[in-house]
Image (cartoon, rainbow, N blue to C red):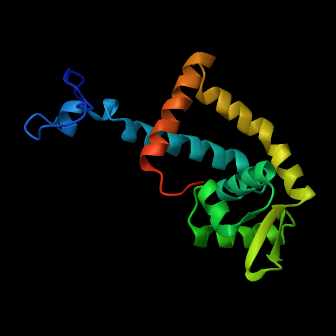
């Protein structure tokens, strides 16, 4: 990985195709999407390993976390917040319901729509895992101070606005 490229990476408002850097010039260690994928792949692998002891998967944990914070959501809303395909979320909710961790209730005005909410058992399951998740989170940001963290989160929000497809 060549670290010698010193030109502009983002290119400002308009990039002339003749001066657009190649991926080889930028290098993988300076290409943010690659780095974000590496970070999240490692985070998810570590989390998945820790979740086994709690009889949870990453998708189950995401659903429980979102529901603990938001109350009741539709499957579509939950899929967006939990960053999971709807078909995967439906299967995950089947398993969570079988475990007694969530409930699905049809809306009286539209029986096709189901509101999903966490049960007390589901909240307890997430609460029992949260300390492990928080320590993983702290380890991920070891050496990053609060100001750097806030700036990083602000940048992530800008990126999310740039690519957002859902209003959620």
Count of numbered marks: 0
State the image coordinates of residue 45 (x, y, percent, origin top left). Answer: 58, 46
Which quadrant of the figure contains the N terminus?
A: top left
- Which residue is farthest front? 109
Q: Is residue 86 left or right of residue 165?
A: right
Q: Residue at x 30, y 35 (%)?
A: 28
Looking at the image, which is closer to me, 167 or 56?
A: 167
Looking at the image, which is closer to me, 28 or 49?
A: 28
Q: Residue at x 67, y 72 (%)?
A: 91
Q: Quadrant of residue 140?
A: top right
Q: Quadrant of residue 50?
A: top right
- Which residue is farthest left? 18
Which quadrant of the figure contains the C terminus?
A: bottom right
Judge whether residue 138 can be spotted in this image. Answer: yes
Q: Residue at x 75, y 81 (%)?
A: 110
Q: Is residue 66 above or below residue 28?
A: below
State the image coordinates of residue 127 (x, y, percent, origin top left). Answer: 85, 44
């Amino acid at each position: 990985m060549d670290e010698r490229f010193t030109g502009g990476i983002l290119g400002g408002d308009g990039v002339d195709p003749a001066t657009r850097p190649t991926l080889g010039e930028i290098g993988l260690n300076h290409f943010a999407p690659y780095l974000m994928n590496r970070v999240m792949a490692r985070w998810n692998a570590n989390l998945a390993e820790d979740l086994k002891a709690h009889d949870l998967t990453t998708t189950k944990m995401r659903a429980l976390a979102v529901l603990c914070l938001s109350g009741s959501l539709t499957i579509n809303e939950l899929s967006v917040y939990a960053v999971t395909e709807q078909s995967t979320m439906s299967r995950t909710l089947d398993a969570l319901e079988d475990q007694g961790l969530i409930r699905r209730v049809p809306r009286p005005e539209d029986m096709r729509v189901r509101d999903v909410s966490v049960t007390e058992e589901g909240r307890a399951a997430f609460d029992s895992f949260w300390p492990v998740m928080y320590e993983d989170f702290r380890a991920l940001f070891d050496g990053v101070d609060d100001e750097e963290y806030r700036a990083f989160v602000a940048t992530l929000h800008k990126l999310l606005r740039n690519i957002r497809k859902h209003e959620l």
